Amino acid sequence: MSEIRDVAIDLGNVHTEHMKLNVGPQHPSTHGVLRLMVELEGEIVVDVVPHIGYLHRCFEKVCEQNTYTQIVPYVDRMDYVNSMNNELPYVIGVEKLLGITVSERIEAIRVICAELDRIASHEIAVATFGMDAGAFTPFLYLFRDREKILWVLEKLSGSRLLYNYIRIGGLMRDVYPTFKDDLRDIIKTVRETNAEINNLLNDNKIFVERCANIGILPPDVAINYGASGPMLRASGVRHDLRRVDPYSIYNKLDFEVCVGTGTMGTVGDSWDRNWVRMLEMEQSLRIIEQAMEMITDSSEDVRAGIPKRIAPKGELYSRAENPKGELGFYIVGDGKAKPQRVKGRSPCYVNLSIIPEISKGYMFADLIIILGSIDIVLGEIDR
Amino acid sequence: MLPNEIFDKLKIEFGEEIISLNEDPGYEPSIKVEPTNLVDIMLFLRDEEGLEFDYPSCLSGVDLGANLGVVYNLYSMKRAHKITIKVEVPKEAPDVPSCELVWRSFDWHEREAYDLLGINFVGHHNLTRILLPDDWEGHPLRKDYVQPDYFHGMKVPY
């Protein structure tokens, strides 16, 4: 047996310097074209400076040069993985300016579309978050399910991702006859897969070790930074626009607002953010089940209410609960066919601005986990 | 709290600096204020008992022709009420006090308004371009903006 002794090493004048590391703009873990300037001390993150704008397509300038109807497809291209939810606040806002209301049946179809897309968006979020943590299998399972949802929405609207389906005053077209059967099929599949994902991913010890207690966002900081969506709710704040400021028919529907409880670590950590998304998928399924009952067979023309001339005068801030958070549109109309100003308040933009606050002091590998847990889409950040 | 109650409360505290309340149909209720003492007004809105606007929803810059406007959409989670605060500054000297330390969310929002409309937020710690390249000239969301023909030798209009 050899004797273990402490060996004194003379460090002399050895000192370390902070290293600046550039992550992105072309990097799989940045979920798009995002560049992070990271300052590291060894492997500890000292500072993060996000650089955005690589996908800037002048959304707001384009809006000023198009009519209200022509803007709807542009709105789709903000958060391109959940277009239905982008259309909803914009269309509701313009309808409010015009003072028109739509029937409950149309609202129910809108809500179903929005919730389907919410599930699709959360599936991407959970899948890519798993990939960031090194779990590849859930990605395949979730994308298989997401494809099913996209297929139904494609049957409905004719496009796979950018639907242009919700129109001002109505819908693009009515639902097809076997729509409800497809919905029942989706509900069954998503429930089964999510139970499997809980076994594979969320309760997996390796995954929990990677993301519990990482990137803790306290509730007061979250509110002051304007965080919204799962990011805010994971910090324990029970704030969901569908409940606190209801639009469409959400006040008639029964669903829970899911919040993070710190099951695996601390309230507001990366695991909680992911878990809130898992819980919200189940709530979306419940909403779809209830809204399905509201689509009674009728001979209503869903295009009848679309106004011929759209030239509202007035201004408002219209907001809705997007899967990523509070998506708002500040619309100013001056009585002409084209709006004077449309500003998109993007939830990802605001959520990403918190990253320097919550990633300091963690390891560099944890920064990738924190970024993944925020669930950003660069199309919406850069607009 | 209703918009007129919020207006009265602000009027008592700040007097002349609170200009008007707009409750026209078609418009969301908004209060127009002078930019000089904006940070104090915002701190009052955030901290005063009964108002407690803790959640910053949105900040938008608007080109109003002769003037530039900044619109703050605020929401209170505790009281579940909302209000819009508006500020107008002339285009020649578009100086608005920065509210980034009242609500940290406005850090990036103010940078965006500076980038696209050229509103100068006085006191912002890092007022640089955020969406456009650092060496871009002009502020594109202004109505009188003229698109350049070339940017670094690349043709801009396609």
Image (cartoon, coloured by chain):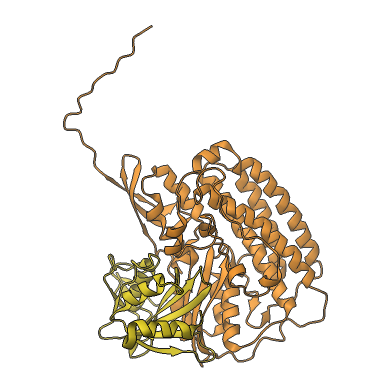
Horizontally, residue A350 falls left or right of residue A134, namely: left
Residue B146 is at least partly visible in this image: no
Rendered view: A47 above or below B155: above
Could you tell me which residue is drawn at 60 percent across and 44 percent down?
A202
Badge count? 0
Residue visible at 57% across and 36% down in the picture:
A205
Instruction: From the rendered image, report the letter of the chain displayed in yellow.
Output: B
Image quadrant where one finds the N terminus of chain A: top left
Position of residue B104 measured from the top left corner of the image (x, y, whole percent):
38, 64
Q: In this view, does A3 lie above or below A96?
A: above
Residue furthest to the left: A13
- Colour orange maps to chain: A
Q: In this view, does B58 lie to the left or right of A126?
A: left
Pinpoint residue A383: horizontal percent, then vertical percent.
Answer: 46, 69
Q: Nearer the viewer, residue B97 or A347?
A: B97
Q: In this view, does B154 lie to the left or right of A202?
A: left
Closer to the camera, A339 or A74? A339
Q: Nearer the viewer, residue A290 or A366?
A: A290
Q: Position of residue B156 (x, y in %)?
A: 37, 75
Which quadrant holds residue A252? bottom right
The vertical placement of A274 against B53, above or below, is above
| Res A284 visible | yes
Which x, y percent locates residue A65?
47, 84
Residue at 71% over, 83% down: A303
- Does residue A199 sit above or below A151 in this rendering? above
- Describe residue B110's horizontal placement relative to residue A340 as left or right: left
